[in-house]
Amino acid sequence: MPRWMTYVLTLLAVVVLGVALAAPIGPMPGFRLGGNDATPPDQWSAAALPEEIRLATFAGMLPHVVIIWVVESDNRLYVIGSPDSTWVEGATLSPDVRVRIGDNAYDMRATRLNPGPRYLFEKYINRYKDSYPDIIAGFPPMDEFSQGAALFELTRR
């Protein structure tokens, strides 16, 4: 194989790897949200929500994109995170976020609720306890969880 072909293939592999790593993978954040621009619907249906969504915050130089669980209550969306996580800090500093659900990406606002209503934390745990029993079992007791976690309501901008 000619030397130039080796360089081209190496460069191509680096570009493909870079693009792949720009998106969040499991618990590792990324900076590429993707999706088609869309207007948030007037009604969120719990049945239509996937277990995981992507959420992008914009407090730093690059977007910070995470894969996160979401819960719906009374046609409103909520996400919960650890108060010291990068995305929580980003959404607190700059509440304009983008959310990707399926193939659609929505401009949203993340409003932190302090303190968050306990029933939302219970709904969150009930939604995920069957699919992720080991993770839910590692959560602190409900009183501690509902007082210590950061709860955000996602609304249209």
Image (cartoon, rainbow, N blue to C red):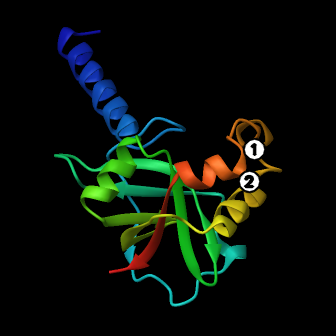
Q: Residue at x 39, y 51 (%)?
A: 88
- Locate the N terminus by quadrant: top left
- Of all residues shown, which one is farthest toward the bottom? 42
In the image, what residue type sits under mark 2? Tyr
- Total number of numbered labels? 2
Say whether residue 36 is left or right of residue 127.
Answer: left
Mark 2 touching mark 1, by CB under 8 A? Answer: yes
Residue at the spot of label 2: 128
Say whether residue 15 is left or right of residue 71.
Answer: left
Per the rendering, the mark at residue 132 is 1
Q: Position of residue 136 (x, y in %)?
A: 73, 43
Q: Residues within 10 Å of mark 2 (few under 14, many from 20)?
A: some
Q: Residue at x 46, y 35 (%)?
A: 28
Relative to 125, is 144 above or below? above
Relative to 156, is 140 above or below? above
Relative to 98, is 65 above or below? above
Per the rendering, the mark at residue 99 is none
Q: Position of residue 69 (x, y in %)?
A: 59, 55
